Amino acid sequence: MTRDAQTIEDVRDMADEVAGLMADRFGGARRGEHPDMQAMLRRRGGALPRKLRRMARLLSEADLHGAQPRIARQLDLPAISRAHRALIAHLQPLGEMSRWRNRALNFAASVLFGLMLLAALLIWVMVRRGAL
């Protein structure tokens, strides 16, 4: 989503998108969990450069204040849109394929480790019984 924020609902979508990208890039989310922007800033906000951290804080506060209609009307939507564009540009393109490859390699390594443990257990049982 690269469009500008027109309403406060757009800000919520933007914050969710950035939080998801932060979880993908830096980790900090359990399997099946979709943390909000405030949680991702607490968990992995330090991994962002200082300028982008300020922008992420702006987006997070806008998301938080969006639930209050009087405050939501006072939000600076162009600044929020600029912050979203900068965060997306930083988080999205770098290493998407390598992150997918790393996940696949981690899964394969886990399976291989389990099989090695099973083989070691079988060899130990065979030695104890005198088959080897």
Image (cartoon, rainbow, N blue to C red):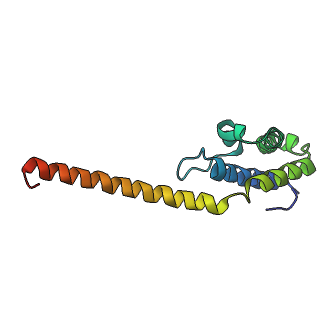
Task: Please indicate whether residue 84 sits to the left or right of residue 121 in the image.
Answer: right
Residue at left 67%, top 42%?
Answer: 40
* Pick the front one: 72 or 116: 116
* Pick the front one: 121 or 45: 121
Relative image position of residue 38 (x, y in whole percent): 70, 40
Residue at left 92%, top 51%?
Answer: 78
Residue at left 46%, top 57%?
Answer: 107
Give the residue at the far left of this rendering: 130
In the rendered image, the quadrant that contains the C terminus is bottom left
Vertical position of residue 12 compared to residue 43: above or below? below
Give the residue at the far front of this rendering: 132
In the rendered image, the quadrant that contains the N terminus is bottom right
Relative image position of residue 3 (x, y in whole percent): 85, 62
Residue at left 61%, top 57%?
Answer: 99
Q: How many marks?
A: 0
Let me know if residue 30 appears in the view: yes
* Pick the front one: 86 or 16: 86
Task: Please indicate whether residue 10 sits to the left or right of residue 33 in the image.
Answer: right
Q: Quadrant of residue 72?
A: top right
Relative image position of residue 125 (x, y in whole percent): 15, 50
Let me know if residue 8 appears in the view: no
Relative image position of residue 84 (x, y in whole percent): 82, 52
* Pick the front one: 102 or 29: 102
